[in-house]
Image: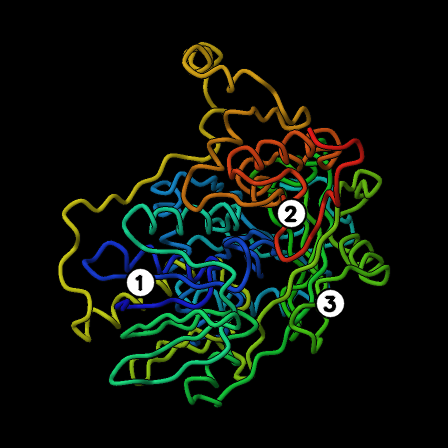
Amino acid sequence: MFDIAIIGAGVVGGMVARALAKYNVRVCILDKESDVAMGATKANSAIVHAGFDAKEGSLKARFNVRGSEMMETVTRELGVKYKRNQSLVVGFEHEREEVEAIYKRGLANGVKWLELLDKEALHALEPNLNKDLTCALLAKTGAIVCPYELCIAAVGNAMDNGAELVLDFEVASIDKKDGSYVIKAADGREIETRYLVNSAGVYSDKIAAMTGDADFSVTPRRGEYMLLDKECGNFTERTIFHTPTKMGKGILVSPTVDGNLLLGPTATDIEDKEDTSTTPEGFATLFDKASDNVANIPVNKVLTSFCGLRATGSTGDFIVKERDGVVTLGGIESPGLSSAPAIAEYVEEIFANKGVLGEVKKDYVATRKPAHYFRELSMVEKNVIISKDPAYGRIVCRCEGITEGEIVEALRTNPVARDLDGVKRRTRSGMGRCQGGFCSPTVVELIARERGIPFESVTKFGKGSVINYGRTKGDK
């Protein structure tokens, strides 16, 4: 019997788990995928929004502004890369009134350090902008972070403090029984819990319906992205938005915390909650709209493309409520990443007020060693580690300079990587120019060795994503 079960191991669910795991309660995190951060968390804009966009008085505004304020401390504690690079909302002359309206909305939301810029000041800050842009809002609290790194660290920190992670657990039914909830998976496994947190992303409406709540629906909104090579990472210093529309914040151009340049996302409402395909039409839109903001984008330097699904709720706002022991977190689309620490803080308050949490654990640890610590050491410091463990001296991923020691560490650290993409998200092995063409076979060997499974059983991202179908030269 668990005290609290969290359905959904994305960044919101992960932050909630971290907040609750510091108390003397038994917490579990359930997810239908083979790893954490497999939904919108692994495919989004990676922006810590300042909070100027959301409607005044909305939950989006409330949690965004508070989450943005919390993020620097949270990322420092979890050892996650974070950079306050600032944000610009740019506009043409006919959009000046909209830019000014966003500025006023930001002030009403309590966002600090906002400024309106004229054309000269704007182009002095960002020389590569489209020369026809004449006005902008500068948000000095805007920042960037790695969303899946944040999620992995949050879940890992929760696990280090006693939370349990159950993967490949696709919820089929939820039944109330003698004051608790029995959650049954499609494969027949069952989890019993006193309280429940629904943080299931695009499936949050489906999970809510299983608990008797059919008051909202969630529509998947497809967002396609392009990621450019690191040599383009300084093309803009700040995150560049255009004036938003009812479909979202539009196509942005932004550096990433790892030094690449990101374009996206598109915004297309679809029905299929699993359709993360990319399209030629999406790429054309990305280039066309991004060029409205930034001139001469070097799209010949695109390394990869991907697509994520935003959980767009029918209410137009975040859906955050508690009923009969179930906390529902639905429609957590953008700015969900920015809001995650504040949403977790609010869920913690809900359970504290219900008398569920009790005392903080005496051995609770809020901090976590950065996954990227080895890369940031001096050569002298690296050599000390290599002298103790030669695996840190063997380069596996040449593009990103990732060693065998770092990969093995990712295969042994909560939450452990179980497949090729899991290693990629934790170490950046396979994220460089060759996109894993050189390092993948070695990484597969390391996964097989560490997990004690056959080489051909290693998958790309679980669920039958076969990499090797069998041996061609007999037994080895």
Which residue is found at the position 67% from the left and 36% from the top?
Answer: 430
Which residue is found at the position 86% from the left and 59% from the top?
Answer: 280
Which residue is found at the position 67% from the left and 68% from the top?
Answer: 274
Give, as a three-letter code, the residue at label 1.
Glu
The crowd level at tag 3 (other Cα within 10 Å; few <14, some 14-19, many 20+) is few
Q: Quadrant of residue 62?
A: bottom left
Could you tell which of marks 3 and 2 lies nearer the N-terminus? 3
**Which of pointers 3 and 2 indicates the residue nearer the eye?**
2
How far, Cα to Cα, is label 3 from label 2? Answer: 51 Å
Q: Quadrant of residue 121?
A: top right
The crowd level at tag 1 (other Cα within 10 Å; few <14, some 14-19, many 20+) is many
Could you tell which of marks 3 and 1 lies nearer the N-terminus? 3
Where's residue 375, x and y in %? 51, 24
On the rendered structure, is 196 left or right of 179? right
Q: Which residue is mark 1?
A: 345
Q: As rendered, which of 29 and 166 lies closer to the eye? A: 166
How far, Cα to Cα, is label 2 from label 1? Answer: 36 Å
**Which of pointers 3 and 1 indicates the residue nearer the eye?**
1
Where's residue 110, x and y in %? 39, 64
Q: Which residue is mark 2?
A: 459
Question: Could you say whether the residue bearing mark 1 is in a helix, strand or loop?
Answer: helix
Give, as a three-letter code, the residue at label 2.
Thr
Residue 144 sits above or below residue 267 on the image: above
**Disc number at residue 370?**
none
How far, Cα to Cα, is label 3 from label 1? Answer: 41 Å
